[in-house]
Amino acid sequence: MYGEFYSKGVISNIINHNYMESLFLKHITRDYIEKNGITNIQDAVEVVNVIQYAVKGNLIPKKVRRHYTIVKEFERMSQEHTTLSKTKIIKCMAENLDVHENTIWNVLKDHSDKYQRSVVDLLDAI
């Protein structure tokens, strides 16, 4: 389902901030669309608009966006690269996201469950 929106350019045309922001927008859009069972392109575009509004208005604080992105990217990379160790995945993420490895370790240790639930639920309130 997510691939359909991505191939039509709905998600790929999201704001081109830095890499971290782009990943956040991609992950949060996918999660929200999947959580709510959105299948209509117009509804998906509205989701993208709401997310952009929330980011631009700082309704989702930068720290929360960063932590959410780290958690989601770790999940994605762990699934795609099953032969790599957690340490190697984190080193790769640190380089790609321009974040210190210790920051990634701490986010994963302290915040994984917290950020997965709260950010998508926050969008329901907007």
Image: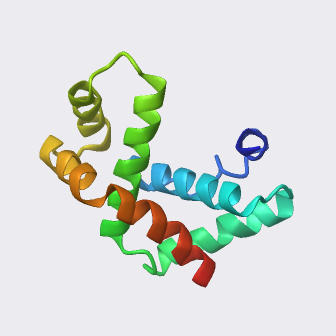
Q: In this view, does 47 lie to the left or right of 104?
A: right
Q: In which quarter of the image is residue 85?
A: top left
Figure check: 109 above or below 50: above
Q: Which percent across, then down, holds residue 86?
A: 26, 30
Closer to the camera in the image, 51 or 83: 83
Residue positioned 24% across, 25% down in the render:
88
Residue positioned 86% across, 58% down in the render:
40
Whether residue 126 is visible, yes or no, is no
Closer to the camera in the image, 52 or 81: 81
Figure check: 104 above or below 94: below
Whether residue 31 is visible, yes or no, is yes
Q: In this view, does 12 lie to the left or right of 63?
A: right
Q: Which percent across, then down, holds residue 65?
A: 39, 63
Q: In this view, does 94 lie to the left or right of 70?
A: left
> Which residue is at the far front?
113
* Image quadrant where one finds the C terminus: bottom right
Q: Is residue 103 left or right of residue 42?
A: left
Residue positioned 18% across, 52% down in the render:
106
